Image: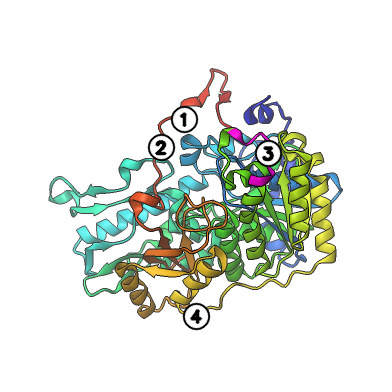
Amino acid sequence: MKTDIEIAQEAVMEPIVKVAQKLGIKEDELELYGKYKAKISDEYMNSIKGNPDGKLVLVTAINPTPAGEGKTTTSVGLGEAFGKLGKKAVIALREPSLGPCFGIKGGAAGGGYAQVVPMEDLNLHFTGDFHAITSANNLCAALLDNHIQQGNELGIDTRQVVWKRCLDMNDRVLRNIVVGLGNKMDGTVREDHFVITVATEIMAVLCLAEDMDDLKERLSRMVVAYTFDGKPVTAGDIHAVGSMAALLKDALKPNLIQTLEHTPALVHGGPFANIAHGCNSVRATKTALKMADYVITEAGFGADLGAEKFFDIKCHMSGLKPDAVVLVATVRALKYNGGVPKAELGSENLEALEKGIVNLEKHIENLQKYDVPVVVTLNSFISDTAAEIAFVKKFCEDRGCEFAISQVWEKGGEGGIELAQKVLETLEKKESHFHVLYEDTLSLKEKIAAVSKEIYGADGVVYSPAAEKQLKKLTELGFGGLPVCMAKTQYSLSDNPDLLGRPEGFEINVREAYVSAGAGFVVVLTGAVVALTGDIMTMPGLPKTPAAFSIDVDEDGRITGLF
């Protein structure tokens, strides 16, 4: 069986200029990054603002398991299937982060015959967007420390610096560091921290910004520290906005590439969904809607994280209105939720499937709370039996969902036609009445309770003394009207990664809260005892055998080992 990278390298790509022509984009409306990558110019985006919007389809999934679900693969394959059916479709995806690509997964560009290409470029440096974000973030950090060094006119309390440096690589030793060591001219000695680039507020800001003016406004609001008397200090206060915006000028433009079947794909931005809002950029999604009749987009991790944030943060802020949702599951992952070890998932087990399908059930219920039509798709594996598929199909249809098998990994667009037809049928027959889960007027605690009870299925919320104090302070500072961005483990509906299926009788533990004022949400960190349940890592570490061990390049420049 060929690997993903072998399939990608054997593909014959079309010049990106030719792919763009399918959408009516002229060559001089592109900013080319070689032969197969381009950025969409501001001039082109401005020229299509008057076009009607296409239909917006979100792809999400059940909680991720070691058995695999295939959310990106499904998104790509569905876009290819629309093309096979003669529909004008564009895919809008997130960019992969270097850290996980060299850490635990080796790449994130779809899989099999449902990939975006050039796959190696996408998983490595691509067009440099993440490098620009890293540079802008660290410039802000440098200006902040320089302000403290040069007299500290604003009265910044060095014990209350909240801005962290970043790197687009998993590196656990940078989580907690000391800076300013050396002589007096080397800065003020203080504790500092690193986060991974995709966990930065600048990543979230870039993905939520409508244009350059909005970007600069958001950058100016970012809280970087607090003064001795507890007042917030912003990036605007330390004169960091213009220079950061200059570094982000090109990164703000969506990237255009193609699938293996030459379907256009806008790939832009990608904050983590367990610690940020987990969606590609508003600009990419809105541009895609003006370019095509159908737009397929995705949100990170399970629907309890990515979809909730797509709805309650991204759509709420931008005015986007999804027309349908595709919910991805696999028979293997459902059996894993039913207690079957990974090594035994290849055998038919209807009892375990019945036990584990409650995870899918909860995600269906959650999505229906937003009044958006749902299509469930099973990402097909050779080990799936007819009885198992029939069980899932009936289960979904009994709950008012359309159902389709997806074979896009094996067959590309051809394997997604059944799913595409179900999506088209849903768009024609079922109307979306999308609304958010909670109103802005609720208190931060009421918003946290709404997500915890309605989406996670918790009985209630328990706050640490620190979180109580932080939420009170954020409300007093005027941030109480913002949506909440819940930072939670992706592996469970609860905040304990070990609780599979559909946990009941649990409480959500809130241990910390802070504002991302530029992005426009309050981040709420959940999890009980960190040592037991696992921290929500904003700077992940590398495993014992990192994916980097398998990655290499030969003398001809051919990369191997990326998934």
**Residue at (31, 53) in percent of width and height:** 142
Which residue is more in the foreground, 1 or 366? 366
Of callouts 1 and 2, the N-terminal one: 2
Of callouts 1 and 4, the N-terminal one: 4
> Which mark identifies residue 66?
none
Whether tag 3 and tag 1 are in contact, CB under 8 A, the answer is no
> Which mark identifies residue 548?
1
Q: Amino acid at mark 1?
A: Ala
Q: CA distance from mark 1 to mark 2?
A: 9 Å
Determine which residue is flagged by label 2. 542
Rate crowding at label 3 as few (under 14), some (14 to 19) or many (20 or more) other CA atoms within 10 Å: many
Of callouts 3 and 4, the N-terminal one: 3
Determine which residue is flagged by label 3. 115
Please tell me whether residue 7 belongs to the stretch shown in magenta: no
Q: Amino acid at mark 3?
A: Gln
Badge 2 element: loop
